[in-house]
Amino acid sequence: MMGMHYLSMVFYPLHEGVTMEDAEALNKYMAVAPLGAILLVIFSHAIRSFIGALVATLLSQVSKWKNSTAIKYQFLFIGLLFTFAGWYNLENLIHPGWFKIDLIFYLPAAYLGYSLVAKRA
């Protein structure tokens, strides 16, 4: 996800003096950030959920974990975990009001990651 954030800064550089580590300056930037920059943030969050579920699903197919019921629904855990983390982020950093739409992409992205590599038995 952070890789995607840094890649988006190639197209939409942060203002002078704003860094990813400075929450106050980042809050001020988010208030005036261009739409494209915000959309790339939403995309990077969905990619995080997608890749997390994809990797977890691949790991769950290791023979010693294959029959565990808990492992079969790891995409749901990852999607919910990232949804909560996204909500926490929304509470602590300033975002445009419509940015809450970001929260609806975590679970579908996790399910997509899962469904691409899940082996049906």
Image (cartoon, rainbow, N blue to C red):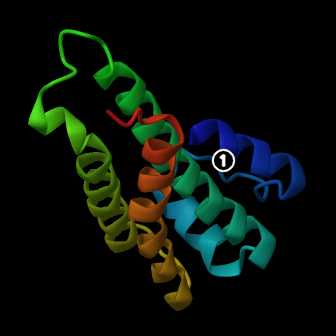
Report the side of 91 relative to 16 (left or right). left
| Frontmost residue, 114 versus 10 | 114
Q: Is residue 42 above or below residue 112?
A: below
Residue 49 in percent (x, y) is at 45, 49
The reply to whether residue 45 is in sight is: yes
Query: In the displayed image of the protein, which residue is found farthest to the top?
Result: 64
The residue depicted at 41 percent of the width and 24 percent of the height is 58
Residue at 53% from the left image edge and 80% from the top image edge: 99
Residue 85 percent coordinates (x, y): 31, 56
- 53, 13: nearer the viewer: 53
Residue 34 in view, yes or no:
no
- Residue visible at 49% across and 57% down in the picture: 109
- Which quadrant does the C terminus fall into? top left
Left or right of residue 118, residue 10 in this image: right
State whether residue 42 is above or below residue 79.
below
Question: Residue at point 76% right, 56% down?
Answer: 14
Secondary structure of the residue carrying numbered label 1? helix
Q: Nearer the viewer, residue 83 or 33?
A: 83
Residue 76 at what x, y percent from top left? Answer: 27, 53
In the figure, 33 relative to 65: above or below?
A: below
The residue pinned by badge 1 equals: 5
Q: Nearer the viewer, residue 22 or 60?
A: 60
Q: Amino acid at mark 1?
A: His
Image-quadrant location for residue 70: top left
Measuring from the top left, give residue 84's x and y in whole percent: 26, 61
Question: For the view shown, which residue lies furthest in the left direction?
Answer: 69
